[in-house]
Image (cartoon, rainbow, N blue to C red):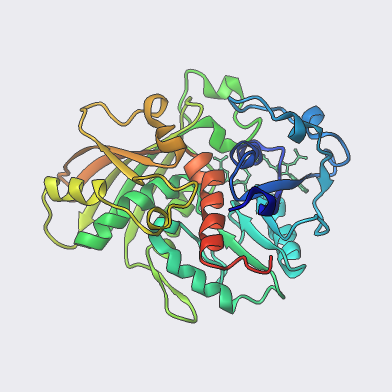
Amino acid sequence: MNPEQKIPVGILGATGSVGQKFIELLTDHPWFEIVALAASQRSAGKPYGQVVKWIQNSPLNRKIGAMIIQPTVPVLPCKIVFSALDAEVAESIERDFAEADYLVISNARNHRFHPQVPLLIPEVNADHLKALGSQSFQKGKIVTNPNCSTMGLTLALKPLMQFFGLTRVHVVTMQALSGAGYPGVSSLQAIDNVIPFIRNEEEKLESEPKKILGSWDGSRFIEAPITISASCNRVPVLDGHLESVSVKLASEASIREIIQAWSTFKSIPQDLKLPSAPEFPIHYFEAEDMPQPRLLRNLEHGMAVSIGRLRPCSILDFKFSVLSHNTIRGAAGAAILNAELMVAKGYLSGK
Ligand code: NAP
């Protein structure tokens, strides 16, 4: 795409943990240009660099730091907004933007189970974008990406379901601190500790993969008939959610066949060579102590998931560990990949 023709985009919730990751990933993006940053009334009207508690590894771009934060109302100078809004406020704000003819590409949970809103992972269910034709937010649209721990799990499950069928899943997560937003969990709670509770997280992990792995029948989403049990824990890791997963398959498979299914898995984003698509969405590691968050979370710029330790399970059929970067593949990077898919498929023409 010609840099002169970059598509203008805005970021809602630009000051938060995910909002910052959007800025990091969209600064110098080949297709999109940030033209608006919005946050709450506490932040609006001030230069971004003065307000934000920047917690990313790369320094804040000076031009972005000088941008004035806008109130979060649908008068931004763009037609596409990435939403990293707090879920407490996202529902009505995202709907207002969609009704004002914006395309809202959201990280928040609020519209994920709306009957016409795709819950999208481009490698898994790109065809769910067809549901956009049924949406009734006036002229605008909403597309969501899943919860950060759903992302790694569902990418790992997709090839299993495709090649062998899948009936039951048991998952235990070890989730990074950045998943709790900023400032998130206090140091006195987090250090030397594991917190065996994350509000609403188990419910999301038990429901979202079923919508994503299900189908769109032309008028509604049909959930995949899988039973999922999840237990979620917050651990003192900065970024990267690790999950211990056990699965029951619908047909027989060998360890070699499963690893082959994961390692060769590619899909539409890879065929279309989308800028944020990993070359391989799934990497399998043979080492007995992998995947580890500190070593593998940035694999393929944080967009690939790492799997290891595939072995027989004495209750279900197989068990393994899966790791994904929660604010990149599990949030901002995922939403940007959704937008790239929509550009490539022509859903953004006229925006
Ligand atoms: P966060 O750090 O708490 O940031 C929340 C953002 O929302 C801030 O920019 C805040 O602006 C803005 N905001 C709050 N109230 C507002 C209002 N009334 N009007 C306009 N803006 C308002 O949260 P986060 O971790 O970045 O998460 C953002 C969203 O992504 C959440 O819905 C979360 O569930 C979802 N998500 C997070 C992750 C993750 O790994 N962190 C992964 C997937 C999805 P101010 O600074 O001005 O208050």
Q: Is residue 236 above or below residue 87?
A: above
Q: Residue at x 51, y 27 (%)?
A: 238
Given residues 41 and 1, the one toward you in this image is 1
Instruction: State which image quarter holds ligand 1.
Output: top right
Given residues 311 and 142, the one toward you in this image is 142
Residue 69 at what x, y percent from top left? Answer: 82, 41
Residue 253 at what x, y percent from top left? Answer: 12, 54
Residue 231 at what x, y percent from top left? Answer: 40, 43
Q: Residue furthest right?
A: 45
Which quadrant would residue 182 be assigned to in this image? top right
Regarding residue 174, the answer to whether it shows in the image is no
Q: Residue at x 50, y 69 (%)?
A: 129
71 to the left or right of 320: right
Q: Is residue 51 above or below residue 232?
A: above
Q: Residue at x 48, y 77 (%)?
A: 220
Q: Is residue 36 above or below residue 179?
A: below
Q: Residue at x 45, y 37 (%)?
A: 302
Residue 349 at what x, y percent from top left? Answer: 63, 68
Regarding residue 170, the answer to whether it shows in the image is yes
Given residues 114 and 63, the one toward you in this image is 63
Q: Is residue 147 above or below residue 61?
A: below
139 to the left or right of 324: right
Given residues 343 and 150, the one toward you in this image is 343
Which quadrant would residue 271 be assigned to in this image? bottom left
Which quadrant would the C terminus be assigned to in this image? bottom right
Q: Residue furthest bottom?
A: 219
Number of marks in picture: 0
Which quadrant would residue 250 be assigned to in this image? bottom left
338 to the left or right of 156: right
